[in-house]
Image: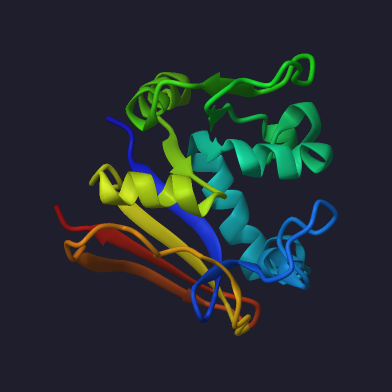
Amino acid sequence: MNTLVLDISISLDGYITAGGQSPDEPLGQGGERLHDWAFGADEQNRAFTEKAVGGLGALITGRKNYDDSLRWWGADGPTGPARRPLIVLTHEAPAESPENGVYTFVTTGIEDALAQARAAAGDGVVAVMGGANVAQQYLAAGLLDEISLHIVPVVFGDGVALFARTGAEHIGLETVEVVPTDAATHVRYRVIK
């Protein structure tokens, strides 16, 4: 069975976007800072990214993230030339999607999206990415095996909070790995079930 991992960049104060989101700045004003670690010159961060993509089988995201990011992703999706399948949770599939794209649209809920992602992933990891609502749904449902956070040293003070509305129950975590770099601290937790 594949491991289901929430993998996401986050500000020190818990936001996955900065405030002031707009169509031209879907991560909010200055929110791109959350991804600088993945695209910068630091070799340790590049190696971390390459290792993560290498083990990745498929991804799950929400429709808003898809709509906000498609112009940068194109047909290849968020993993670029690696072309990992991206399952998009939505209430309604878009009328058009890039030809030969990596996208599958699921309108029947998080369990069906997970089943399709696992089937597409082979032996690889399934990652839940971008979209706080999608992440919160998987966390509240108890379906996540791990949480991988890339904590960027910035305090936004406003934006979209990752861990809002995850249910009344506490969720226990066990630290598996911590990789500190100047651009981000990568922390991987196992979800205690």
In the image, residue 157 above or below residue 58 = below
Question: Is 92 left or right of 146, judged from the image as shown?
Answer: right
- Residue 21 rendering spot, x and y as whole percentages: 73, 62
Q: Residue at x 85, y 54 (%)?
A: 24
**Based on the displayed image, in which of its 4 quarters is residue 169 positioned?**
bottom left
- Residue 81 rendering spot, x and y as whole percentages: 74, 34
Q: How many marks?
A: 0
In the image, residue 129 above or below residue 180 = above
- Residue 104 rendering spot, x and y as whole percentages: 58, 20
Q: Quadrant of the N terminus?
A: top left
**Based on the displayed image, in which of its 4 quarters is residue 45 positioned?**
bottom right
Q: Residue at x 74, y 68 (%)?
A: 20
Q: Of 69 and 81, which appears nearest the observer?
A: 69
**Scheme of image coloration:** rainbow
Q: Of 170 and 128, which appears nearest the observer?
A: 170
- Residue 72 rendering spot, x and y as whole percentages: 82, 42
Q: Residue at x 70, y 34 (%)?
A: 77
Q: Residue at x 63, y 42 (%)?
A: 64
Q: Of 174 and 181, which appears nearest the observer?
A: 174
